[in-house]
Image (spheres, rainbow, N blue to C red):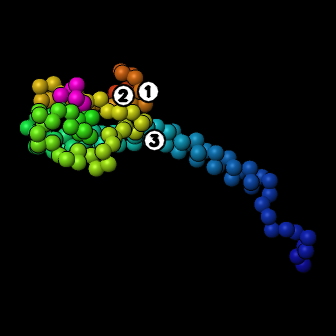
């Protein structure tokens, strides 16, 4: 005969073993997941910079035979900085919503034009020039 008072449930020992196993699995998986968010943000910034360069800046150059100067900056892609100098400027600007894109941390990109060689820079997570590791500046020329 079977014992009618016996319940079908987990014992305390079985629960403890399951908890220990889950803890070990979490300890092995977590180190590989940490830092992936910042890496993804950095990769997105590279994609954004290449998109700005290959899209808006190239269209500006096609229309006006030159890139904006460093002083004019990316703002020249939203509003014509000099009607006489840029007589073929697009009437709607070069960004669809007439707003400058921001990097993954909400900062404006830095634009440099050195005699026709264009560089876009994001200050990274620390929002300061220079930096190391996650705070390292991201330059379009160094993106893969």
Residue underneath mark 3? 37
Q: On the image, which quarter does residue 5 sit in? A: bottom right
- Give the quadrant of residue 38: top left
User: Does residue 48 belong to the magenta stretch?
Assistant: no
The prevailing secondary structure element of the residues shown in magenta is loop
Q: Residue furthest front?
A: 84
Point 23% across, 44% down: residue? 93
Nearest-to-viewer mark from 1 and 3: 1
Tell me what residue is drawn at x 21 percent, y 37 percent: 80
Pick the residue in front: 25 or 105: 105
Q: Which dot marks residue 144?
A: none
Q: How far, Cα to Cα, is label 3 from label 2?
A: 17 Å
Discs 1, 2 touching: Cβ within 8 Å: yes
Compared to 136, does 8 lie above or below? below
Q: Quarter of the image containing the N terminus?
A: bottom right
Task: Please state the extent of the stretch shown in magenta in the rendering.
Answer: 69-73
Which of labels 3 and 2 is toward the front? 2
Instruction: In the displayed orientation, state which residue is furthest to the top.
Output: 130
Q: CA distance from mark 1 to mark 2?
A: 7 Å
Q: Residue at x 22, y 29 (%)?
A: 72
- Residue 13 lies, in percent from the top left, at 77, 52
Look at the image and tell me in which quarter the C terminus lies. top left
Q: Secondary structure at mark 1?
A: loop
Disc 2 on helix, strand or loop? Answer: loop
Residue corresponding to mark 1: 126
Image coords of residue 127 (percent x, y): 41, 27
Labelled disc at residue 123: 2
């Amino acid at each position: 005969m079977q014992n009618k008072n016996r319940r079908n449930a987990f014992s305390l020992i079985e629960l403890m073993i399951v908890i220990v196993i889950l803890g070990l699995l979490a300890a092995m998986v977590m180190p590989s997941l940490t830092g992936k968010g910042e890496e993804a943000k950095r990769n997105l910034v590279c994609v954004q910079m290449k998109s700005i360069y290959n899209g808006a800046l190239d269209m500006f150059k096609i229309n006006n035979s030159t890139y904006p100067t460093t002083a004019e900056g990316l703002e020249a892609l939203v509003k014509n900085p000099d009607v006489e100098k840029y007589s073929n400027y697009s009437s709607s600007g070069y960004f669809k919503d007439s707003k400058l894109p921001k990097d993954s941390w909400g900062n404006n990109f830095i634009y440099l034009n050195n005699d026709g060689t264009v560089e876009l820079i994001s200050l990274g997570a620390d929002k300061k020039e220079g930096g190391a590791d996650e705070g390292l500046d991201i330059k379009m020329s160094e993106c893969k």
